[in-house]
Amino acid sequence: MFRGDCINAAFYEKETEVRQLLESKANVEARDRFGYRALDWAAYKGHLSIVKLLLAAKANVNAVDKLGDGTPLTKACYSSAPLNTSVVKYLLENGADLFLKNIKDELMLDKCKEHASKETTEILQQYQTELNQIKVAYPHLICSSSNLM
């Protein structure tokens, strides 16, 4: 097997193959020639079951692509895949950081909102509001070096 097997299986939503590759310890952080990982492609394509498998296998939910301007969350937001809203919710529930900045010092959240569907934008805004409320109510829980500040 070559390093792209998991990426290709995720891209084409071959859940059984992804599961087998992960059981054989495939590298979930391997990148294709575009710098995308299996999780990036699964998020973009709206393959929720694959996203779940990859996150369970400890894929980095906040890994930035080689170009420095995208994460699995932004890829899910850019997508018009039917399940992208479910993927966005799942990524957020599993630690996707809305406040990461890209190489141009732009918030990934803003890039997501530019490209997301209305429903996905509402989810992002709701999640952002909840995080901001937590930040105000519990400022001592937020690390001073965080992008939240």
Image (tube, helix red, strand yellow):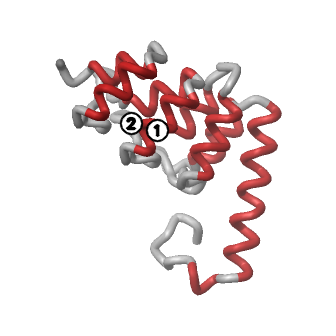
Q: Which residue is mark 2?
A: 65
Task: Point out residue 78 in the picture as x, y percentages from the top left corner.
Answer: 62, 28
Secondary structure of the residue carrying numbered label 1:
loop
Residue 87 location (% of width, % of height):
62, 35
Q: Nearer the viewer, mark 1 or mark 2?
A: 2
Q: Report which residue position mark 1 lands on.
A: 69
Q: Residue furthest bottom?
A: 140
Q: Residue at x 37, y 34 (%)?
A: 67
Q: Label 1 sits on what residue type? A: Asp
Residue at 38% across, 36% down: 65
Placement of 146 over or under 57, stated as above or below: below
Of all residues, the one furthest to the top in this rendering is: 12
Element under label 2? loop
Q: Amino acid at mark 2?
A: Asp
Residue drawn 68% across and 35% down? Answer: 86
Which of the 4 image quadrants contains residue 123? Answer: top right
**Picture residue at 52% right of the left edge, 64% below the top:** 147
